[in-house]
Image: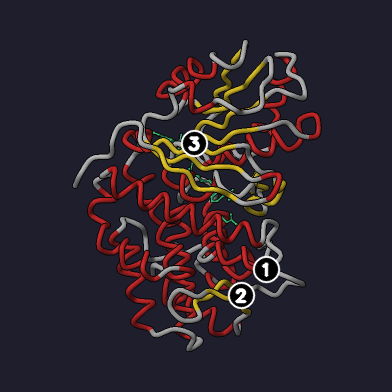
Amino acid sequence: MPQLDSHSTSNVLIDLGARSYAIAIGTGLIGQAATYADLPRASQALIVTNTTVAPLYAEQVRAALGTHYPQVHILALPDGEAHKTWETLQLIFDALLTHGCDRKTVLFALGGGVVGDMTGFAAASFMRGVPFVQIPTTLLAQVDSSVGGKTGINHPLGKNMVGAFYQPHRVVCDLDTLQTLPPRELSAGLAEIIKYGPIADTVFLDWIEANLPDLLARAPQALVHAVRRSCEIKAWVVAQDEREAGLRAILNFGHTFGHAIEAGMGYGAWLHGEAVGCGMVMAARLSAALGMVDAAFAERLVLLVAAAGLPVKGPVLDPIDNAGRYLALMRLDKKAQAGAITFVLIDGPGRAVMREAPEALVRSVIDSCCAA
Ligand code: NAD
Ligand code: GLY
């Protein structure tokens, strides 16, 4: 497998008119001053990161930003999905106000999807909106959460229930940062990459199957293709439906079941990507049970999810009425309307649609997919 040229970068454009921005994908990016040229200027910048990522990357980013901003502060939040809360969000506002930051201050989200979603929400609301830049350091954040402007926090009763659509000025995906990612987090990112195949691109699905060993080995050429193709598909969807009036919901394939797993187990017990991987298994089997796609295609997806190191058996959330507990949690999903759950289902390979499903069928799929 050939190596990437050092410092080779490719860009994917998110086309949103005056709010368009580039996703830079490459290696050696985060520590270069040039990466941050032509961003909005201000007297201060705040790097929001967490206690795990800060010792790895925050000083390189600060040094590079120091070329452009007279004062660069670092805020390290507590790490983990369980901290994607109002209390942690408040720490960002505390830092901004303590440092005397103003309306021009630029926020830099350095970390995974948790840091990115919270920093984006803080940027959307601090002084009614300041610029921000995403520097995603997990595979999941590089292929999904840093792109497209969904920001927010969890509520104990539901995932990502409080938030805003707010686009970053740039996304910087430095593949070098993926080398320090724990294996379980790498697999979690693969779930969101796999997602793009069944909903939009069967050629990409074939490629993922063929190149999974290289992806698991973090081969740079495989990573760059996976990140770029994922971002291209997401950019195509977001450009057509930024605020999820319709099409964008396909990006939630596996998430209706997955969010129920995350909330039902307690945030952080299952990684978001793990819950999405298992949720895709359930959604694919529900699609097959509805006769929308061959059972063979659904089982092909199950094999790929398992090969990526992700769970394919759902957890038991309630020993008395497990399916009932899943259904109750899924009725809180943002796509549910008047208590009716809408699923993202596969309507033939490479095509996703939104549909309700008979409760008895959903119950039987949950029962057959959950660990005894
Ligand atoms: P995460 O942010 O919790 O990061 C995973 C773990 O990896 C954390 O412990 C983190 O500190 C650590 N980490 C990050 N970068 C590292 C590195 N380079 N080396 C070593 N460790 C590193 O989780 P995630 O999977 O990145 O993101 C999940 C979150 O993203 C969820 O809250 C989910 O709801 C959200 N999400 C949002 C969107 C969106 O469109 N906004 C899309 C998908 C997911
Ligand atoms: N991750 C789903 C979306 O961005 O819409």
Crowding at label 2, few (<14), some or many (≥20) Cα neighbours within 10 Å?
Answer: some
Q: Is residue 251 left or right of residue 86?
A: left
Q: Is residue 163 visible?
A: no
Tags 1 and 2 in contact by the CB under 8 Å rule?
A: yes
Tags 1 and 3 in contact by the CB under 8 Å rule?
A: no
Horizontal and vertical percent position of residue 212: 27, 57
In the rendered image, which residue does mark 3 sit on? Answer: 172
Horizontal and vertical percent position of residue 67: 54, 14
In the rendered image, which residue does mark 2 sit on? Answer: 354
Amino acid type at circle 1 is Gly
Q: Which mark is residue 152?
A: none
Horizontal and vertical percent position of residue 187: 35, 51
Crowding at label 1, few (<14), some or many (≥20) Cα neighbours within 10 Å?
Answer: few
Amino acid type at circle 3 is Val
The mark nearer the N terminus, 1 or 3, is 3
The mark nearer the N terminus, 2 or 3, is 3
The mark nearer the N terminus, 1 or 2, is 1
In the rendered image, which residue does mark 1 sit on? Answer: 246
Q: Is residue 182 left or right of residue 219?
A: right
Horizontal and vertical percent position of residue 276: 47, 59
Q: Residue at x 52, y 61 (%)?
A: 258
Which is more foreground, mark 1 or mark 3? 3
Label 3 CB-ligand 1 distance < 8 A = no
